[in-house]
Amino acid sequence: MAGPIDIRKPAVPHGKAAWGWGLMCALLLFPSLLLADVIYLKNGQKISGQVTKEDEKQVYYEANGGEFAISKNLVDHVEKSESPAAAAQGSPRPNRDVPLPLTPPVDASLGEGSAAIRDGAVDEAYLSQLTDDALHNATPENLRKLKQGFQAAAVFLTRKGDPEGAILKYHDALKYLPHDQALTLALGYLLWKQEHYLEAVDLLSPEADRYPQSADFRVLLGSAYYGMENLDQAITEWNKALAVHDNPQLRAAVERAQREQDVSGSYSELHSEHFLLRYDGQENEKLSGEILNSLDGSFQDLVLELDYSPTETIVVLLYPNQAFRDITRTPSWVGALNDGKVRVPVSGLTQMTPDLARVLKHELTHSFVRQITLGHCPTWFNEGLAQLEEGSTTAALGSQLARAFVAGKLPTFASLEGSFVSLPPDQVTLAYAKSLAALEYLRDVFGMGEVRRILRLMPSSDLSTVLQDETRMSYAAFEDEVANYVVKKYGS
């Protein structure tokens, strides 16, 4: 999300104006960035995640790219973080605000003590034995063991930051248990999470017809269609789910999708290898073509820079300014938005500008980061990298930033992992400057290769642990080193 800008006019490429591109971009991005709740288990282990609800039998939570439930019999107690609710007040809804299954598709307790996991890895020999037993003697007991074994392996791989490996495990299990509801929902959820929308549609469509009383299949199916920008079909599937089970979030999603459809239903489309771009009116055709070319160029730049290439089509929507406000319901200072789709207001523009190119590359960086980290990139790192990739520097605010470091007036990086919305207004700009300074420090001292490694480790571990392992610095030491870097560079 880009900050308060006027993309009809050339902007200053660097300096204070450049901060507008990144200002508050993270507020609408990753829901998992809020400080984690901790579930303490009776066996002494603990799970960090965002607890979404509890009932008499289970605790439900989101963590490591998935949504899970764990039996209360295994739970000693839950410590809820105090900051997420406060931080979220007054903030827009987070990234990919679409409905998900009413019941988490996986019971996280499956991985506890499973024979499918040995010495910190999936025991492939054990899984092979399960498949052999099921193939030669498909008793209910053998099939039950196979299901539990492959589910445990998939949960383990998801937690380790390998959702693609987990997807393969679910596919393997479904070869022996076709049409199993739990396996199919879990696989469909992961396909949606990984933005494999077409695969999710192919998987879920026949199962939604097979299980007409399960709203969950229709919910996921509609969310996959929504990701593909097929709003008609998304609305149809969500309405079918509502007919089975009324749900306020689902009704809100239908209303939101209907608003989008009312605005963009007649939009024209352009396609490239990596993008679906939709725009309003023939008068924007030339500009849209230039935007698509810019996106393709930025995509290739980011592939080389981040050593990663998203496989799924990225949807980009160009709106008149008022339509952008009507659809996104964002504050007036928001100049663009990436909520799983890149949304940009373009009223008054007739040709590509350097400013617009930077906005697009900034938002596209968020798409790369989301896929690389499975949505588990702390806000300061995410925003710092997006600003770095769009070409911003800390130069214009360097002296002010250095003084703030020396005076100890900046929030810590640990406090900037979540939403910036609760920061005092006079700290926001410097918080973004500090985020960019941190990425400049990592790039200049350790190289972009280290930045890439840190990104890839984020799905499986918290950032403080990653920093310790990769840079041999604690969060506190990292704070000091970034401060020294800025003061040495800009201090008088």
Image (cartoon, rainbow, N blue to C red):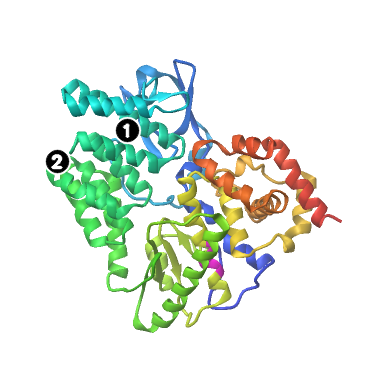
Q: Which of 177 and 257 is in front in this view?
A: 177
The label number, if any, that marks residue 21 in the structure image: none
Task: Give the amino acid type for the residue marked by disc 2 in the picture.
Answer: Tyr
Residue at horizontal 65%, vertical 72%? Answer: 12
x%, y% of residue 93?
Answer: 42, 51
x%, y% of residue 230?
Answer: 27, 61
The residue carrying mark 2 is 211
Q: Is residue 360 magenta?
A: yes
Query: Badge 1: few (under 14), some or many (20 or more) residues near its Cα, within 10 Å?
Result: many
User: Is residue 205 toward the left or the right of residue 345 in the image?
Assistant: left
Please, what secondary structure does the residue beneath circle 2 have? loop
Q: Looking at the image, is 94 positioned above or below residue 177?
A: below
Residue at horizontal 48%, vertical 60%? Answer: 331
Q: Looking at the image, is 212 positioned above or below residue 361?
A: above
x%, y% of residue 428?
Answer: 63, 53
Residue at horizontal 69%, vertical 48%? Answer: 446
Tell me the magenta residue range.
Answer: 358-362
Q: Is residue 296 magenta?
A: no
